[in-house]
Amino acid sequence: MKWSAFLSLLFVSGCGPKEERRAVDEIPMGYVGKARINPYLAAEKYLDQLGWNVESSRTWSNYDNETRMIILPGSFLRTKGMAIRVLDWVSRGGNLVMTIEGGEPDRNDFTELDSGMGFSKGGDYPGLDHVLEQLGISSAHYSYQAAEHNSKNRGHLSRPWELVKTKEEWGGHSLEFEGEVGLGIEKGRNWIPAKDEKSRMVGTNYGSGEVLVLAHARPFRNPYLARADHADFLDHLSGVYGRSGKIVFLYGSSNSFFGMVWKEGWMVVIAGLVLLFAWLWMRMPRFGPILRDNSMKRQPYGKSLITSARFLWRTGELEHLLRPLRAQLEKKNHGDPESFHDRLAEESGLTRDEVVEALTINPPKDPGHILKLAQKIQTLFKR
């Protein structure tokens, strides 16, 4: 009965009017493989196809004069020491292209939320602050009118962005920028017409090299390279700064492994050091006067003798306990043993048989027997 009711229910539901299927919006979740780690992989491959000598790296190397242009995020300059190394390379003829926001490898380009370093409040990145100070570049909040786009689009297009155009003498390229960072420079070049004395891209000379600073890394990242004039702009920069040399994209962190461990797990490191110190304190030898062990208790000579006798009896060497005593007594006897036994019996008060037993019976029978023999030998010594 139950089965028939269930089958009839399926039949009725199958005969009903078909519902119109709703379209499912597919939301891109991001890249996989190398593109998930390297946000500049598309730019690297694009320049490689154009014939440029290009590579990418997560760490800073001792770059020589053969490296003509380096593109790196501002978050790479976490320490002042790293900033000094970068500026030293620029002063020897290198060309640096630096982005303030959006250049971090862990930034997700396929979400609506902003991600990445954000606006530096000062002191968060001492290396970046040092570079901007040396170049005479200031950063401040920037207000802009977001470009018109379809709000129904999901993914990276949903985040507000601004379309700006570089000056004609610098190529006249249309570029997309995000974020709220505006740049100002005392002595240098504004690549984009300034708005309220703030620009999205500035440049200046430093030593024998040049530095170009962008407010955002959007024109170089994987999802946006094919948008606006980003590809042409990258090719233009390579022709200006990377001619007859190598181009390097840096997308990692300037921190060493130990620096990352200290930053992310300093509490665990401190706890481990405390435990190591405690373990060493327990295991290391103490130096100083040895205290007397007050727990030692003296015991009577007879008890010590019984203990020694029991040990020698277990090992079958009881005769070793009496042998030295007998040898001392026999040294005094240079005559007949019979007369010596009689004399010892007369002087000690023992019978002649007891003297003979103390000096000649070997081995003793048991620990109690050896104790009696030792007492008799002591009597012979005290006579």
Image: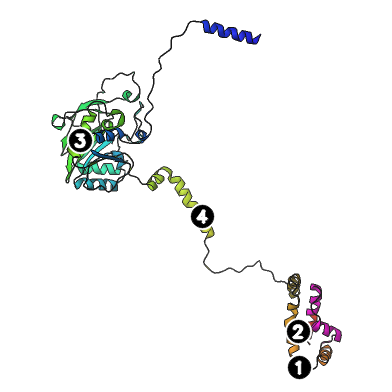
Quickly name the residue at label 3: 237
Asked if the residue at tag 3 contacts the one at tag 4, i.e. Cβ–Cβ closer than 8 Å, the answer is no
Quickly name the residue at label 4: 278
Q: Nearer the viewer, residue 296 or 90?
A: 90
Quickly name the residue at label 2: 326
| Residue at x 51% of width, y 58% of height | 281
Q: Quadrant of the C terminus?
A: bottom right
Quickly name the residue at label 1: 334
Residue 200 seen anywhere in this rendered image of the structure: no
Q: Quadrant of the N terminus?
A: top right
- Magenta-highlighted residues: 348-374
Magenta span: predominant SS is helix
Q: Amino acid at mark 3?
A: Leu
Q: Nearer the viewer, residue 47 or 111?
A: 47
Choose the circle earlier in sequence order: 1 or 2.
2
Query: For the residues carrying marks 2 and 3, which lies nearer the camera in this image?
Result: 3
Choose the circle earlier in sequence order: 2 or 3.
3
Choose the circle earlier in sequence order: 3 or 1.
3
Residue 310, x across and y down, in percent: 76, 71
Residue 77, x across and y down, in percent: 29, 42
Residue 277, x across and y down, in percent: 49, 55
